[in-house]
Image: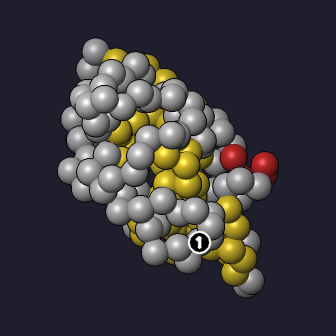
Amino acid sequence: MAIYTRSTTTPAMLSYVSTIQYGKGKLVDQTSKKFGALNFGTIGPGEKSKTVITVLSFPAAQAIKNIKIGLVNAGGITFANNIFGVTFSSNLDEFIVPETYFQGINTDKSSTNEYNIAIENQDSITSNYVYLNIDLPKNTQFQAGVVRYQWWFDYAD
């Protein structure tokens, strides 16, 4: 069984990343889409975004491991280590709000970058749920759709 390092920037992988959105206490959308196109909603200076929940599932593999997620573009926001929230859980819970933050930007877009966050598995082919948000500083404008994240993982087929 061979292990290959892949990234979800490979078009075949993009369909295996799902985002989960809640509205008024119920699930309103669970779709596979390009991971970079997350919708944090309208955020004004000094405000915190809604939490976006995402999960990686790769059913074409026998197993995935060494799962990591990285912030690869801050969308024009001057980076500070208390802006881009991230946490993960094996439980899907719409009320989880990230209390930890990315500590830097993965500018080289590599799987070994020190600023990536290691994500545990729920099962052999699915990551834990990842909760992301943005705590926008005062006097900062947010460019919707420009903040980008990327997944890295190994898989066995």
Q: Is residue 115 above or below residue 42?
A: below
Rendered residue at 72%/77% (across/down) = 4
Q: For this view, does 40 lie left or right of residue 34?
A: left
Q: Is residue 125 above or below residue 9?
A: below
Residue that carries the numbered disc 1 in the rendered image: 111
From the top left corner, tell me how far across and down residue 30 is, in percent.
51, 30
For disc 1, the neighbor class at 10 Å (few under 14, some 14 to 19, many from 20) is many
Mark 1 residue type: Ser
Q: Nearer the viewer, residue 91 or 34?
A: 34
Rendered residue at 74%/83% (across/down) = 2
From the top left corner, tell me how far across and down residue 1 is, in percent.
73, 84
Furthest residue toward bottom: 1
Rendered residue at 44%/29% (across/down) = 142
The count of marks equals 1
Quarter of the view holding residue 32:
top right
Q: For this view, does 12 lie left or right of residue 96?
A: right
